[in-house]
Amino acid sequence: MRVFKENNNIFRLLSEAVSEGIIVVNKEQVIVATNGFANSIFGYATDELVGKHLDVLIPPKYHHSHSVHFNSFVANSEKRHMGKGRELYGVRKDGAEFPLEAGLNPFTIYGTDYVMALIIDISERKQQEKEIFDLNTKLEHKIEERTQELHDTILELKEEVRLRKEAESRMKESLKKERDLNDLKTKFLSMVSHEFKTPLGGILTSATLIGKYTTVAQQDKRERHLTTIKNKVKYLDNILNDFLSIERLESGKVNYKFSKFPLSKVINEVVYNANMLLKDGQRIRYPQDIDEYTIEFDEKILELVLSNLIHNAVKYSAENTIIDVQVHFKEGILTFKIIDQGIGIPEKEQKFIFKRYFRAENALLDQGTGIGLNIVKSHLENLGGRINFISKENVGSTFIVTIPIESVNYHS
């Protein structure tokens, strides 16, 4: 429970961005953390559930069987949907029972095992399913009653059947989208758990070791660990900024600021920062003939787009390779090409590469959240631009960005 108190701000920032209830319990089934949606679903105040046994949220008649299922789940330690094939019910603070769905995700922090549950109140869905069932029953009775009048009512019945099928089709599609969203949220929580756990562990280790270096002669070792801490904090800050960017994009709160600036200024800054990340023998080939270009665009967005693509090219390419950056302007279209000799994207996964939180199988061992390309694509499309790519596994990738520019000023 201590680790959630120490990282309370991070947990709340992430969990409150999720539109479903989150409950985290330890292996003794004691609740150690909740988010606002979970508190609202079960009718409790903020942090009122923390420290209580999970049984407080389960109808008494299910306590024994739930304990058996929970212990079996912890023993197998695998991510899955709870109660598959069975009806699940929760109990609110006022004693009212309601149907729910729960996705379970086991994880470990600092040697302590926890289970994170994603809770959804499906009362409305159950009501909708009942309404559909009642509608079908009524339609069947109506058909039986009108059998003798079939000739006169055939057109009316066909129309009713068509509407019924349309309603069922819409409901099935809605349920499918809901399941897909649940899977996406579960994947998101799993990714966040992993991406934060690793740098936080590095920060803790470096902070501990710094205390052991107390002499002047050990200053270089202190500096090395301080650099590690700064890099890890910057990495976490970048992840949080990406999450905030997604929230702003979805809510339509992004304000773009157009200004005139030298194209070389942005490219110089991006390439300079990327040079800090180069592996042994890697180098970035600078674009030709851009020093005289001044364009009008959102400077921060262009920097974000190029940084993401060039950093990816460096990260997913081996030592002694070249990352080629090309720039072309023709007929009002400014085109950037980022060409690498990296691991490439498997052909079967290329159609998913711009989906949020998606990461290709051959990139899972590298750090990353799978949201950078999604953010880049969203910003470009908002500004009338486009991004596409050509890639071959174990050969490399070429990402192509096109931006409409009304004019490019040349300076001699």
Image (spheres, rainbow, N blue to C red):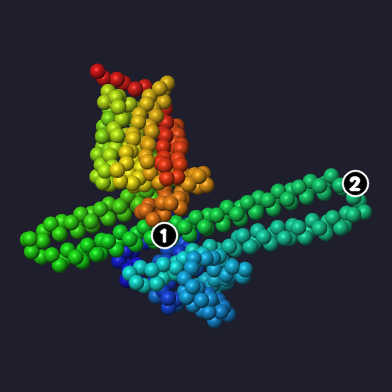
Query: Closer to the N terminus: mark 1 or mark 2?
Result: 1
Pick the residue in front: 58 or 319: 319
Pick the residue in front: 370 or 28: 370
Kindly identify the amino acid type of the residue bearing the numbered disc 2.
Answer: Asp
Q: Position of residue 290 (x, y in %)?
A: 29, 26
Specify whether residue 35 is in view: yes
Q: Position of residue 406 (x, y in %)?
A: 39, 23
Q: Which residue is mark 2?
A: 152
Specify whether residue 39 is in view: no
Q: Identify the element where label 2 is drawn.
A: helix
Of badges 1 and 2, the one in the foreground is 1
User: Residue placed at 51% from the left, 76% from the top?
Assistant: 72
User: Residue placed at 54% from the left, 65% from the top?
Assistant: 81
Kindly identify the amino acid type of the residue bearing the numbered disc 1.
Answer: Ser
User: Residue placed at 21% from the left, 66% from the top?
Assistant: 208
Farthest residue toward the left? 216
Q: Is residue 126 above or below residue 344?
A: below
Quadrant containing the C terminus is top left
Farthest residue toward the bottom? 64
Q: Position of residue 366 (x, y in %)?
A: 37, 53
Q: Identify the element where label 1 is drawn.
A: helix
Farthest residue toward the right? 148
Quadrant containing the N terminus is bottom left
**Mark 1 and mark 2: Cα distance apart in space:** 59 Å
Number of disc labels: 2
Apparent side of residue 127 relative to residue 255 in the rendered image (left or right): right
Assess disc 2: are there few (<14), some (14-19) or many (≥20) residues with their C-alpha within 10 Å of its C-alpha.
Answer: few
Residue 12 image-quadrant placement: bottom left
CB contact under 8 Å: marks 1 and 2: no
Q: Which residue is mark 1?
A: 15
Assess disc 1: are there few (<14), some (14-19) or many (≥20) residues with their C-alpha within 10 Å of its C-alpha.
Answer: many
Apparent side of residue 220 relative to residue 153 in the rendered image (left or right): left
